[in-house]
Amino acid sequence: MAKAYRRFEDHPHVGQVRQTGMILAIEIVADKSSRTNYPWQQRRGLRVYGYGLANGALLQPLGDVIYFMPPYVISLDEIDQLAQIAWHRINIATAD
């Protein structure tokens, strides 16, 4: 999982990527250098969650932190698919 999500560390709107075992968290921020959060009313994490559901991925939002808690039987292709869905939607959710 760490390999699939490594590119998120360089995303301009990702403040931090944390992982413990198969649980991974991606923090979405308005400004990476100052780690300024988006106003909570914008619910950007919820935007990523909704897109994930529509595309077959369960991505848990907690505010603007997106959690991945896949089953242990997940394949490498499925991990890559989750990463692609998250990457695409984080780009859209942070574009405006």
Image (cartoon, rainbow, N blue to C red):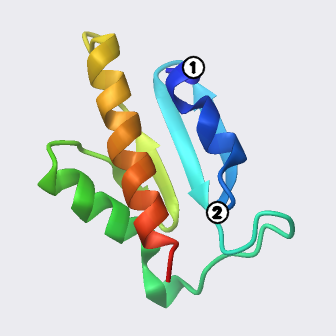
For the point 56% across and 48% down, the residue is: 26
In this rendering, does residue 71 appear at all?
A: no
Left or right: residue 88 versus residue 63 is left
Measured along the vertical axis of the image, is residue 19 above or below residue 89? above
Alpha-carbon distance for marks 2 and 1? 19 Å
Q: Position of residue 73 (x, y in %)?
A: 25, 10
Q: Secondary structure at mark 2?
A: loop
Q: Position of residue 42 (x, y in %)?
A: 46, 86
Residue farthest toward the right in the current orientation of the protein:
34
Closest to the observer: 83 or 63? 83
Residues at circles 2 and 1 in contact by the CB criterion of under 8 Å: no
Specify the amino acid type for callout 1. Lys
Left or right: residue 30 versus residue 23 is right
Specify the amino acid type for callout 2. His
For the point 41% across and 68% down, the residue is: 92
Q: Quadrant of residue 48?
A: bottom left
Tell me if mark 2 has few (under 14), some (14-19) or many (20+) residues whose alpha carbon lies within 10 angstroms of its own.
many
For the point 13% across and 56% down, the residue is: 54
For the point 54% across and 32% down, the residue is: 5
Closest to the observer: 40 or 85? 85
Q: Position of residue 46 (x, y in %)?
A: 35, 69
User: Which residue is tagged 2?
Assistant: 13
Q: How many marks?
A: 2
On residue 92, the disc is: none
Q: Position of residue 32 (x, y in %)?
A: 77, 63
On residue 3, the disc is: 1
